[in-house]
Amino acid sequence: MGGAKRPPFRFRWNWLGVMPFLLFAGALLILPTIVLGARSLAGADGSTTLDNYRNLATPVVIDSFRLSIKISLITALVGGIFGFLLAWSMVLGGLPKPVRSLLSTFSGVASNFAGVPLAAAFIATVGRVGLFTILLKAAGFDMYKAGFDLYSFIGISVVYLYFQFPLMVLVITPSIEGLKEEWREASENLGASTYQYWRYIALPVLMPSILGAMILLFGNAFGAHATAFALTGGNLRLATILIGQQISGDVLQNPGLGYAVAMGMVAVMAVSIGIYSILQRRSERWLA
């Protein structure tokens, strides 16, 4: 008996469409990571050493990571909740179409408005001599004497939220739109209330997407540098600011430690992306 003939090999050209993405990822993600890893192992005299990674356990580095994670968690949680509520209002709240279009446009613009321009806008608005600050002071309320400080942890958190919750709106809106009307109709036919529908059907289906989006917000804040540096000038030592001080600073320069801190951030971001991918696959089982 002769075996079944294998189909002739045919070269497929379809996969070439992914080549630009692979080249882009290799040039801007994989190659820089390899370079960072190599430079993080270099000592001051050019020799290979693990001292830079041992120095990650120093209080300064630990405090910088703790501060970055803290501000990222808070802004991801607050931005995620408010962003979800805004997206829910846009999709299911019966907003007029022009208002919904306006909110969508604002979310697209605000989520990309970051860095030095965002810091300058907030300084001009709610800085110590900002327009809104002066107007409130003229009305008898001094927000800085009341405890607000734009150049502190609270101030930076407020600034981060400006681009965090619009990003949440953009990410979570397709998931809310993916809720099938048949699910609501079936629950109503079985006698479920609106609360029971959201408690036992909608929220469990959306939860992987909500958590995944919050992890995305966490990564977005964790890697931010220019906004915090423009506001505080480095006084608030986040991990990204510490990297800049170690690599290009005049006093605290230790490039090897800076590259090691950067590798630590790469590890945190890799874990975040991995969790986001897992949650995204779980949400697609229902919302695809």
Image: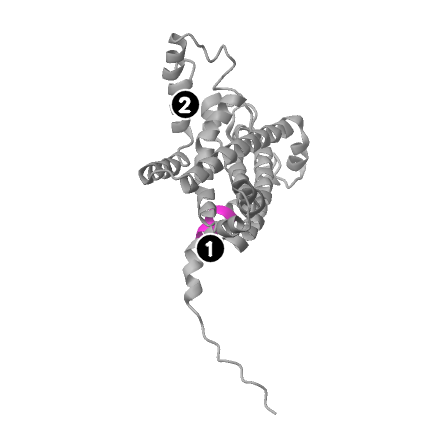
* SS at mark 1 in the image: helix
Query: In the rendered structure, which segment of residues is drawn in magenta?
Result: 22-30
Q: Residue at x 44, y 54 (%)?
A: 21
Judging depth in this view, the residue of 277 and 119 nearest the camera is 277
Residue under label 2, please give it. 122
The correct choice, above or below, for 7 with respect to 126 in the image is: below
Judging depth in this view, the residue of 281 and 90 nearest the camera is 90
Residue 22 badge: 1
The percent coordinates of residue 68 (x first, y second) are 57, 30
Dots 2, 1 in contact, CB < 8 A: no
User: What amino acid type should be assigned to the residue bearing mark 2?
Assistant: Phe
Report crowding for label 2: few under 14, some 14 to 19, many 20 or more residues within 10 A (C-alpha): many
Q: Residue at x 50, y 80 (%)?
A: 7
Judging depth in this view, the residue of 271 and 202 nearest the camera is 202
Q: Residue at x 41, y 67 (%)?
A: 13
Q: Earlier in the sequence, mark 2 or mark 1?
A: 1
Residue that protrudes farthest toward the bottom in the picture: 1
Q: Residue at x 41, y 55 (%)?
A: 20
The percent coordinates of residue 224 (x first, y second) are 49, 33
Picture quarter with the N terminus: bottom right
* SS at mark 2 in the image: helix
Residue that protrudes farthest toward the left in the picture: 98
The percent coordinates of residue 23 (x first, y second) are 45, 54
Q: Is residue 280 left or right of residue 139?
A: right
Label 2 and label 1: CA atoms lie apart by 38 Å
User: What amino acid type should be assigned to the residue bearing mark 1?
Assistant: Leu
Look at discs 2 and 1 and give the one toward the viewer: 2
Find residue 114 and report its image quarter.
top left
Is residue 221 visible to us here?
no
Report crowding for label 1: few under 14, some 14 to 19, many 20 or more residues within 10 A (C-alpha): some
Chief secondary structure of the magenta portion: helix
Find residue 132 and report its image quarter.
top left
